[in-house]
Amino acid sequence: MNFRQLEIYRALMVSGSASRAAELLRITQPAVSRAISDLEYRVGFSLFDRVKGRLVPTSEGQLFFREVNVSFAGLDRLRAQAGRIRDFGSGSLKIASLAALGSTLVPRAVRRFRLANPQIAITLQVMSSSQVRDHVANQQFDIGLAADEVDLSGVDHSVFQSARAVVVMPPDHPLVSREVITAQDLHNMAFIALAPEDRARARMTETFEAVDSRPHVVVETPASGTVCALALEGVGVGIVNPLAAEGFEQRGLVFRPYEPAVYFKSFILFRPDTQRARLVRDFTAALNDALRAGPARQDQRPAAG
């Protein structure tokens, strides 16, 4: 078999008919038919059943298509990398981040990094902390930011930051008049909670249980930014990572300190083979600079060095 046969076969599977495959590839329909016949001869089984003039994939053909698709996905990655090298020159950096930092602090760090490294192609993806860890451990990303509940085996890591939690609420909420919100104040209040696996939520729950406070959980969500959006809509109050809440105060959301103090903690994750790479060091420095330059109200501690 050859690449052209596989390309025609894939186009036929994706488009659903020989005529559309021929149109996509700008060849004739008989050329499509010949290529498929030759490919079937090479692989030794039928890829399609001919039913009333239509080509219907066989079960073997469907299994084969999965493998072909994987191969083409690899080619697509090569084409993308070639494009990045063409457009940016050598060098790229792949960053994965939890949602709390991926739409606020990390973009600021990217801006700082690019001022010194304008030729570097950057990939930034926002995902769950467990996915961040897996992608870095599997060497798909160079650097990751994840919450402290993740398994740290298989990655180099260091504490990145610790941000003191704040209570968020709509401007017409009865608790707005209070300067500080305590665990007792939240008893029976409509409460927007983080996901059960979130370690910061576990720390919040401990403060509730210590004073027999039982907030009424009306929504659970994994992202502090979503808690803010729901609170702004009047769904309830929430306790969030202030780093994820940037911009909501300007939209009318009210912030109050929470007592006793609860902290959101995050780690910076590295592939074992990349921590000392210059680009990774430069981006780590940009992250710390962006953290130090953050809003003054955030009680945060940047990583040393």
Image: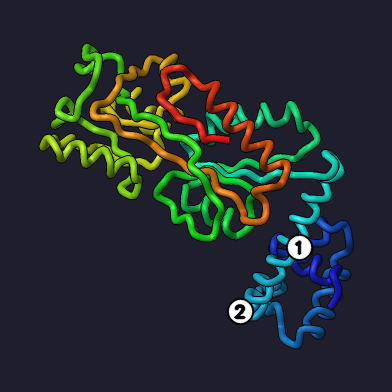
Which residue is located at x 58 percent, y 26 percent?
A: 290
**Image quadrant for the C terminus?**
top right
Q: Which residue is mark 1?
A: 11
Q: Is residue 182 left or right of residue 70?
A: left
Q: Where is residue 253 drawn, in percent x and y?
A: 36, 18
Q: Where is residue 157 drawn, in percent x and y?
A: 53, 49
Which residue is located at x 46 percent, y 30 percent?
A: 301
Q: Which mark is residue 247?
A: none
Q: Earlier in the sequence, mark 1 or mark 2?
A: 1
Quarter residue 126 falls in: top right
Q: Which residue is mark 2?
A: 59
* Secondary element at image label 1: helix
**Image quadrant for the N terminus?**
bottom right
Q: Where is residue 197 drawn, in percent x and y?
A: 34, 50
Q: Residues within 10 Å of mark 1 (few under 14, many from 20)?
A: many
Instruction: Specify the amino acid type for callout 1.
Output: Ala
